[in-house]
Amino acid sequence: MIKSLLTLLLAFPLLASAQPFVQLGERAEVSVITFGPYQGELYSAFGHSSFRVYDPDKGIDEAYNYGVFDFDQPNFYLNFTRGYLYYQLGVFDYKRMQSHYVYNNRYVHEQILNLTASQKQTIYNFLQRNATPEFEHYRYDYFYNNCATKIRDVTAEALAADSVKFDGSYITTNYTIRDLTDIYLSQQPWGDLGIDICLGLPMDKTAAPREYMFLPDYVESGFDHATIIQNGIRVPLIKQKIKVYESREEDAPKGLPHPLYFFGALLIIGLALSFYDERRNKLSSWFDILLFSVSGIIGVLLFVLWVATDHQAAARNFNLLWAMPLHVVAVFAMIRSPRWLASYFLGIAILSVITLLTWPILPQQLNYSLIPVVITLGVRAFMQYRVRTRVSARAI
């Protein structure tokens, strides 16, 4: 789904020779190509989609790929951070592109569209026009305007006069957008955790059948169930489906231990220090400074993503219940130990308990690997309150 220009440019030189509005021959075909997921990288875990235009009479075999972005765009990194992501349509040699995916053991499925000669030319003209510098860029959205949804939208827009219809009645599940994302990241728990932390409540809406098509697999299924009008008759949009390559079974890529193990160890350390601090009536401030600094910085980033960027999926993020931006202020306040600090940590301890108790019914699904983190924050906040209260009482 999410493709890097850098990866593609290393594999396939852009076709500078592509001429706009070339006329196709009688044997030309337009296809939708679905490339399977690859778990070695986060961006490749969802698969990829593109168009193929093949004309043996004209020597054309081109892949039209809407998943390209350019690091050399003006203010690229600033725009990326702010959510103003601009992707572009790239034209590549299809056979070389296919070889790259086969080499990486990613399945390749081709769906040849059931089109008249006029309809094929209409789509090809649309793609050629969109590949020109004037029209090649588009405003990218992770879930609603990406390289997969573009395949559906371009087909529907180019052939609007012939009423392309995508029938989503075959979808019987009630997945949210987050559920769909989780399925594809089952072998990448750290990547899944990062997405679950950064993206907020909009991810937890139940996806309509059309919204499933932000994933290439569902673009393929959507085209399987699509129809088009030809000569006044509604016919299947797919004429032929070819499984060019089926991926071999491979072992899951090895990586870091599951986040639950990592955060479980954090919890054990936090509990051990709390027991130690209780006995000596003194705080292990180094641990709390580290713990609340990291969670506070995460909170600041989440808050900025919500209110100061155009990342719509990052809005209304319930992870702010544990990753509170105010933790950063509290860490700095530990130097002078103002009286309000004990009350602040008591509030955090209570909030942590409420968060844990309401975890299953929160409108946003929080990643379960974070439960040990929330427990650790609550326990350490309570220790901060308890020890500081004792010290203040003695001072009086």
Image (cartoon, rainbow, N blue to C red):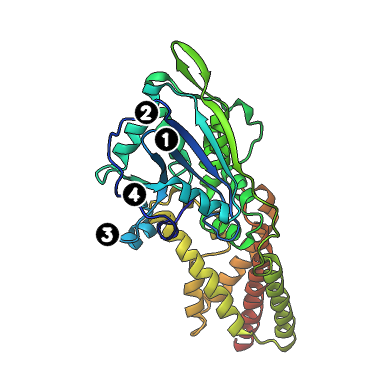
**CA–CA distance in space, label 1 to label 2:** 8 Å
Residue corresponding to mark 1 = 56
Q: Which mark is residue 25?
A: 2
Decide which of tag 2 and tag 4 comes sooner along the chain.
4
Kind of residue indicated by mark 3: Pro
Please, what is the three-letter code of the amino acid marked with disc 4? Leu
Under mark 2, the amino acid is Gly
Label 2, label 3: how many angstroms apart (C-alpha)? 40 Å
Identify which residue, 39 or 33, lies in the foreground.
33
Residue, disc 3: 74
Question: Crowding near pointer 1: few (<14 within 10 Å), some, many (20+)?
Answer: few
The location of residue 374, given as percent across then percent down, is 65, 65
Which residue is at 51% across, 58% downward?
198
Instruction: Tell me the distance, in whole angstroms, between the alpha carbons under discs 4 and 1.
Output: 17 Å
The alpha-carbon separation of the residues under discs 1 and 3 comes to: 39 Å
Work out whether residue 212 or residue 156 is closer to the camera in this orientation and state it: 156
In x, y percent, where is residue 388?
Answer: 61, 81
Q: Residue shown at 61%/81% (left/top)?
A: 287
For disc 4, the marked residue is 15
Q: Residue at x 42, y 61 (%)?
A: 10
- Residue 27 visible? The answer is yes
Of mark 1 and mark 2, the one earlier in the sequence is 2
